[in-house]
Image (cartoon, grey):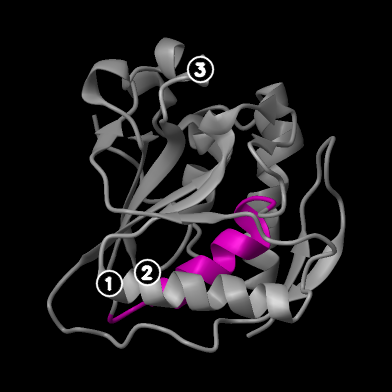
Amino acid sequence: MTATLFLSGTSWAQSLNVPPPAQDEAPSGQGLETAIFAGGCFWGVQGVFQHIKGVTSAVSGYAGGKARTANYPTVSSGMTGHAESVRVTFDPQKITYGQLLQVFFSVAHDPTELNKQGPDYGTQYRSALFVQSASQEKVAKAYIAQLNAAHTFSDPVVTTVEDKVQFYPAEKYHQNFLNDNPDYPYIAINDIPKVQQLKADFPTLWQTTPVLVKE
């Protein structure tokens, strides 16, 4: 499946064909798998992954810094090393890590923006993959190289592949924010188009009822 990318907002509005990864993980048969994605404000990234078949959980949080700084006011300073991230738990028998990467690069964010995403600026909004295994690292690095070699985007992909780190769930009011606040101006402008594009470009992966974080 080739995805047609379209993100709207103040920074980006274009349509591109984003190919699937040439290299992917083989289903391990060892139960659920976890992956951590950082691509700007976690509200929209979480909202996208919550609508994907095979995803059993998508939690907004912080990754890359220390436990003592894993809170929204401190992370917002851009000085903690944390990135706003989403921890995705998925069934590799139903969806692969490579398919999740294709969605991530196609509709969840702009992978060519360095330390920013749309209207948000700072290292906490960087594009990053916190790999959980050697297999994920291999697939992620190969896919980024593939996209850059094919000049899929007009600018190079700046997504970093970072080592496995501790993930800290974000505050309760950040969880399910897109689902609970679809008319919130930031969500309506920057994030609802991502969910709509997911449904249009990945119909076989789309699930209408999102997998929400339970209280």
Marks 3/2: CA–CA distance = 27 Å
Coordinates of residue 46 in the picture (x, y in percent): 47, 44
Q: Residue 118 lies in what quarter of the image?
A: top right
User: What kind of residue is marked 1?
Assistant: Ala
Marks 1/3: CA–CA distance = 30 Å
Q: Give the range drawn in magenta.
A: 93-110
Coordinates of residue 76 in the picture (x, y in percent): 51, 17
Q: How many other residues sit within 10 Å of disc 2, few (<14), some (14-19) or many (≥20)?
A: some
Marks 2/1: CA–CA distance = 5 Å
Q: Do the residues labelled 2 and 1 touch (CB within 8 Å)?
A: yes
Q: Is mark 1 on a helix, strand or loop?
A: helix
Q: How many other residues sit within 10 Å of disc 3, few (<14), some (14-19) or many (≥20)?
A: some
Q: Earlier in the sequence, mark 3 or mark 2?
A: 3
Residue 134: image tag: 1
Q: What element carries label 2?
A: helix
User: What kind of residue is marked 3?
Assistant: Ser
| Residue where numbered disc 2 is placed | 137
Q: What element carries label 3?
A: loop
Question: What secondary structure do most residues of the magenta stretch adopt?
Answer: helix
| Residue 154 visible (yes or no) | yes
- Is residue 26 toward the left or the right of residue 73 in the image? left
- Is residue 80 toward the left or the right of residue 21 in the image? left
Q: Nearer the viewer, residue 158 or 104?
A: 158
Residue at the left extreme, as displayed: 30
| Residue where numbered disc 3 is placed | 76
Coordinates of residue 22 in the picture (x, y in percent): 54, 89
Quarter of the image with the N terminus is bottom right
